[in-house]
Image (cartoon, helix red, strand yellow):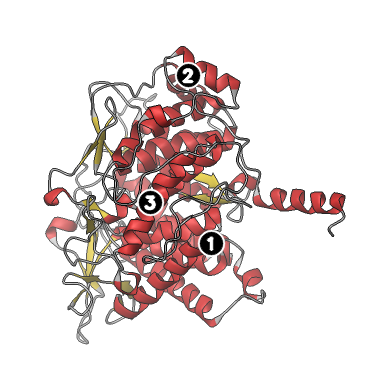
């Protein structure tokens, strides 16, 4: 915690309150965001966590409500966070100071940034660019991806650390667990968000690399798991798998179908054997992750990490080390259950989700005992004993992700803003719209085939913003942000507080509405 509250749980839960129609709580939260949330103080924050939870929470609240209160705060925070991208290669530093806007290298790991953290802020900054017309946000996000791709990962698989000044990978450890996970997730989601083909190409390379190097099956029940390469490609495979890896079931399903239901996607002319294989991987891995809960008899809750067995004489598919028995109420398994149910319609994913939900309630709910006391929830020390020891700590992702995914798993309402075909969820489960036409283009080619860092402008009222070369420091000072904007209300509010204003572009309509609008315009012009 810092010197003053940043409202992590409040901001991270805004869209959950909107989804669940918790109107009274939402009014209180909005009032706090408007009147009390302040980023102008001397405190270092983690770049990644602040981007996905705080910036992502504010942006998704704006997407769902079209309320400028959230956009104003998102713009203010985005301007602060840009300082993290000031390395020579544009790779964000691990932390940033909110007062100075200065990026700060990690105090451990020889200053390296986590690869997943550096490459999992792009959805947020690209959406902020789309809302504001401010190209600098977009280009900062793209520079990271260009620099990382030029590091030339083998078969699309990346080591989990990268040096921000050189964009060179540090070490050889490859995994889809901690510090690696959301790199792969955001390749697909950047493609879904912007339709930029370079990200689909990169994503498909990673899927092939995962299948070739990391996928294995346990004994005796042939459960698919994704292992780790501690010494890199060519080295021995560790059968350890973090619970974090369980996000990948949903990722594979979304990669195959792009959010369409399975039967519809299979009837398209674009359906291939490769996409069918991705769906098989999605189903098999999600089943494995369910078994990580179901096969823990004491609580029915998964530990943080399991180690899978491949010995033909094994009587159980995995075991749990003493240091890995805790449960942080993580969302990744129920996340994949949500995607698999929405895409396949198979009721078993709801049944598995309900079983997990009941065990969370049974073992992690805390009450003070009074008749008016409200339940609270906590993480656990050890899922292998009953009753498990409670930790007296709840991460904000319990509300922003785990409970949200469980709610969406059983929610049959058809709000188009929550439709998988119209939106993409960031790695903290905050929804952003997909673009029928992105406001800026990627502006770079893969592995040194760059034509220009200057993105092709598509359709945006914003003017050009200069950006340094890849080998020079990225100028991310607020002085670079333009003083004239097209949203007078937001601009005036920021001016009164002595800050540069940032614009608001109209919130993107759901994708189906955008397509209909384009068709109508073409009909008017006589082009169809």
Q: Nearer the viewer, mark 3 or mark 2?
A: 3
Report which residue position mark 2 lands on: 494
Q: Quadrant of the C terminus?
A: bottom right
Camera-nearest residue between 519 and 292:
519
Secondary element at image label 1: helix
Question: Which residue lies at the image location 18% right of the left edge and 60% below the top edge?
Answer: 170
Instruction: Please tell me which of labels 1 and 3 falls first in the chain.
Output: 3
Secondary element at image label 2: helix
Q: Quadrant of the N terminus?
A: top left
Is mark 3 in CB contact (under 8 Å) with mark 2? no
Report which residue position mark 3 lands on: 143
Camera-nearest residue between 389 and 3:
3
Report which residue position mark 1 lands on: 341
Q: Is residue 491 above or below residue 213?
A: above
Question: Which residue lies at the image location 49% right of the left edge and 55% below the top edge?
Answer: 442
The image shows residue 286 at horizontal and vertical percentages of 41, 67
Secondary element at image label 3: helix
Instruction: Please tell me which of labels 3 and 2 falls first in the chain.
Output: 3
Q: Nearer the viewer, mark 1 or mark 2?
A: 2
The image shows residue 451 at horizontal and vertical percentages of 45, 60
| Residue 218, quarter of the rendered image | bottom left
Is mark 1 in CB contact (under 8 Å) with mark 2? no
Q: Classify 10 Å Cα crowding around label 1: few (below 14), some (14-19), many (20 and above).
A: many
Q: Nearer the viewer, mark 1 or mark 3?
A: 3
Q: CA distance from mark 3 to mark 2?
A: 28 Å
| Relative side of 264 to 104, left or right | right
Q: Classify 10 Å Cα crowding around label 3: few (below 14), some (14-19), many (20 and above).
A: many
The image shows residue 369 at horizontal and vertical percentages of 31, 29
């Amino acid at each position: 915690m810092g010197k003053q509250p940043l409202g992590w749980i409040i901001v991270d839960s805004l869209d959950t309150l909107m989804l669940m129609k918790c109107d009274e709580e939402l009014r209180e939260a909005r009032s706090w965001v408007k009147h009390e949330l302040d980023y102008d103080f001397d405190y270092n924050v983690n770049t990644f966590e602040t981007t996905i939870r705080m910036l992502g929470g504010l942006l998704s609240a704006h997407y769902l409500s079209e309320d400028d209160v959230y956009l104003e705060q998102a713009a203010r925070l985005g301007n602060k966070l840009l300082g993290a991208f000031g390395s020579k290669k544009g790779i964000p530093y691990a932390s940033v100071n909110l007062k100075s806007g200065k990026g700060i290298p990690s105090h451990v790991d020889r200053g390296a940034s986590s690869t997943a953290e550096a490459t999992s802020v792009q959805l947020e900054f690209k959406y902020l660019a789309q809302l504001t017309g401010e190209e600098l946000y977009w280009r900062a996000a793209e520079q990271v991806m260009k620099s990382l791709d030029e590091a030339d990962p083998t078969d699309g698989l990346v080591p989990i650390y990268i040096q921000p000044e050189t964009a060179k990978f540090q070490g050889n450890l490859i995994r889809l667990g901690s510090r690696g996970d959301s790199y792969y997730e955001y390749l697909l989601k950047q493609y879904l968000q912007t339709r930029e083909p370079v990200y689909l190409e990169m994503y498909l390379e990673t899927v092939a690399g995962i299948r070739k190097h990391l996928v294995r099956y346990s004994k005796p029940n042939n459960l698919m798991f994704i292992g780790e390469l501690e010494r890199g490609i060519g080295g021995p495979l560790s059968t350890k798998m973090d619970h974090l890896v369980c996000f990948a079931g949903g990722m594979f399903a979304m990669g195959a179908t792009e959010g369409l239901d399975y039967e519809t996607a299979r009837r398209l002319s674009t359906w291939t054997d490769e996409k069918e294989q991705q769906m098989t991987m999605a189903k098999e891995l999600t089943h494995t992750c369910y078994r990580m809960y179901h096969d823990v008899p004491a609580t029915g809750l998964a530990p943080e990490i399991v180690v899978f067995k491949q010995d033909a004489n094994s009587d159980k598919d995995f075991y749990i080390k003493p240091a890995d028995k805790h449960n942080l109420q993580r969302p990744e398994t129920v996340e994949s259950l949500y995607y698999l149910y929405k895409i396949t319609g198979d009721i078993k994913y709801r049944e598995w989700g309900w079983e997990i939900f009941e065990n969370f309630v049974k073992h992690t709910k805390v009450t003070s005992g009074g008749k008016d006391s409200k339940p609270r929830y906590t993480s656990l020390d050890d899922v292998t004993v009953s009753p498990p020891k409670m930790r007296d700590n709840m991460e904000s992702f319990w509300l922003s992700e785990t409970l949200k995914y469980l709610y969406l798993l059983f929610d049959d309402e058809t709000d188009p803003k929550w439709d998988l075909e119209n939106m993409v969820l960031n790695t903290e489960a905050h929804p952003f719209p997909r673009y029928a036409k992105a406001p800026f283009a990627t502006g770079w080619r893969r592995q040194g085939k760059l034509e220009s860092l200057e993105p092709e402008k598509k359709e945006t009222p914003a003017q050009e913003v200069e950006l340094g070369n890849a080998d020079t420091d990225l100028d991310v000072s607020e002085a670079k942000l333009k003083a004239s904007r097209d949203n007078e209300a937001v601009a005036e509010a920021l001016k009164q507080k002595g800050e540069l204003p940032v614009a608001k572009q109209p919130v993107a309509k759901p994708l189906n509405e955008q397509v209909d609008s384009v068709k109508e315009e073409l009909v008017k012009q006589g082009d169809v």
